[in-house]
Image: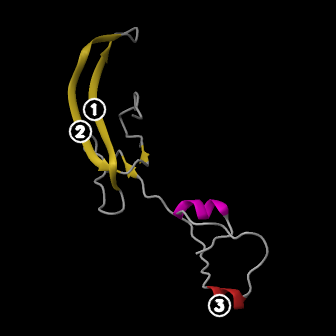
Amino acid sequence: MVFSDSEEAKLIGVETAKGGRLTANNMYSQGYGFATIKPTIVPIHTFNGTTPSDPETPKKDITDGECSIYKVYYTQEYDKKGREVGGYKDEKPYEMHKTTNYIVIDSERGYAVEKWFDF
């Protein structure tokens, strides 16, 4: 298979066409194949429609992979001056394993993303 676009060729590990043009005769006699692809990467979302809850469930052969998502929902109290008072309460941890590494961190009504890690 030969690709004219080097970025497309890299995606599937094949060589790009080397200069010049190929005729229909070349394609038939030398077995060249041409394709244009636009890959779509399916993400895993950290929000599945209800709050709080697990992230979206991976789909076999589409979004299953080597990554994990860990989420913790909690409530933090503040005094009148906006300073944190006490520790976290109402902690609700969730995790999802074997996800793709393309993860969308969704905003959720009433909750804020405090931090995330890529490790």
Q: CA distance from mark 1 to mark 3?
A: 61 Å
Q: Nearer the viewer, residue 20 or 60?
A: 20
**Residue underneath mark 1:** 72
Q: Of label 1 and label 3, which has the lower sequence position?
A: 3
For mark 3, does the 10 Å Cα neighbourhood hold few (<14), some (14 to 19), or many (20 or more) residues? few
Q: CA distance from mark 2 to mark 3?
A: 58 Å
**Residue underneath mark 3:** 29
Is 15 colored magenta in this rendering? no
Point out residue 31 in the picture as x, y percentages from the top left corner.
Answer: 60, 85
Residues shaded magenta: 6-12
Q: Residue at x 58, y 60 (%)?
A: 10
Q: Are marks 1 and 3 in contact (CB under 8 Å)?
A: no
Point out residue 98 in the picture as x, y percentages from the top left corner.
Answer: 29, 49
Q: Amino acid at mark 1?
A: Val
Magenta stretch secondary structure, dominant: helix
**Residue underneath mark 2:** 94
